[in-house]
């Protein structure tokens, strides 16, 4: 479970995230909906300790991210597939990540198969299409077999088959009892994946409701 309390991020005069509080529970897909510029990425970056809040706090199963023993086994994130070293093979990119996070080597082959990149594991990731890069980013999120998964706009760059695949992946991760948190600027996308919806606009929390209630009321 993730607890976000009074989270605030100010860039100069701009309040990118304004006193936002919510909880993300396990066993379901929680959608994080808002238009571009609403503050979704900034919020997710603070949840992952990639950015320091101006105010407020985030707790993951009661602890700060930096206090988690092996963060990647707790929380896997797809934030930026460009974080990969394009000159390395897909396999070696994930192996480096595994080694620096004390994740067993056999997970690398497993997650590459899970995301459908098993056949191109030895190829340099700079030759990958947008969709393949996105799948590699998802593989890195799955590497530590984490209880919590954070996906920032995961369908971007995927073809229809890839979009269908990631929707099913998120649902099955939630059905296994994991916490899945996924952002999108598209209500149509959220309606197809999320059980629960958190809506943000101009940095402020606008709704925190089950998908069924949200659809009934809007
Ligand atoms: P979203 O992910 O919902 O598209 P962001 O969290 O990326 O929104 O951005 C929220 C707001 O904060 C936007 O107005 C954006 O321009 C601004 N912002 C984000 N990062 C920075 C930054 N590093 N410096 C200044 N402003 C930023
Ligand atoms: P997204 O739409 O995925 O949130 P953005 O294009 O808003 O991505 O942001 C990409 C990067 O640029 C992020 O690291 C964000 O923090 C930074 N950024 C966004 N808006 C601004 C801004 N107004 N000034 C400086 N950096 C920004």
Image: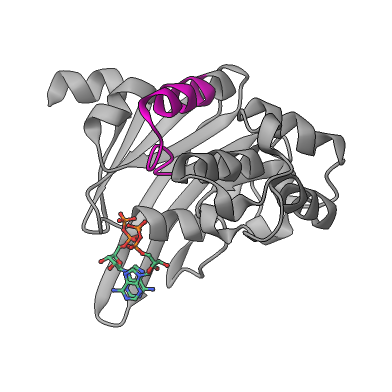
Residue 101: percent from left, percent from top: 80, 53
Q: Is residue 157 magenta?
A: yes
Residue 180 or residue 109, whichever sits in front? 109
Q: Is residue 131 left or right of residue 27?
A: left
Tell me, yes or no, if residue 2 can be seen here.
Answer: no
Residue 114: percent from left, percent from top: 65, 26
Q: Is residue 211 magenta?
A: no
Q: Is residue 102 left or right of residue 49?
A: right
What is the span of residues highlighted in magenta in the rendered image?
Answer: 152-171
Q: Quadrant of the C terminus?
A: top left
Q: Residue at x 85, y 50 (%)?
A: 102
Q: Is residue 33 left or right of residue 121?
A: left
Q: Is residue 208 above or below residue 204?
A: above
Q: Residue at x 50, y 52 (%)?
A: 79
Q: Residue at x 62, y 57 (%)?
A: 84
Residue 48: percent from left, percent from top: 56, 56
Q: Quadrant of ligand 2?
A: bottom left
Q: Quadrant of the N terminus?
A: top right
């Amino acid at each position: 479970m993730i607890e976000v309390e009074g989270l605030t991020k100010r860039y100069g005069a701009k309040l990118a995230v304004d006193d936002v509080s919510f909880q993300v529970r396990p066993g379901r897909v929680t959608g994080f909906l808002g238009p571009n510029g609403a503050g979704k990425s900034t919020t997710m970056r603070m949840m992952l300790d990639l950015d320091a809040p101006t105010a407020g706090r985030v707790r993951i199963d009661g602890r700060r991210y930096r206090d988690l023993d092996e963060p990647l086994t707790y929380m896997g994130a797809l934030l930026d597939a460009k974080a990969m070293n394009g000159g390395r093979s897909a396999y070696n990119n994930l192996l480096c990540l595994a080694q620096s996070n004390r994740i067993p080597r056999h997970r690398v082959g497993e997650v590459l198969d899970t995301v459908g990149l098993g056949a191109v594991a030895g190829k340099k990731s700079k030759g990958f299409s947008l969709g393949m890069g996105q799948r590699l980013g998802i593989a890195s999120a799955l590497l530590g077999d984490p209880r919590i998964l954070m996906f920032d706009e995961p369908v971007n760059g995927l073809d229809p088959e890839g979009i269908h695949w990631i929707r099913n992946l998120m649902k099955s991760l939630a059905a296994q009892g994991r916490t899945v948190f996924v952002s999108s600027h598209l209500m149509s996308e959220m309606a197809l994946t999320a059980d629960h919806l958190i809506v943000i606009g101009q940095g402020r929390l606008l709704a925190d409701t089950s998908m069924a209630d949200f659809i009934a009321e809007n």
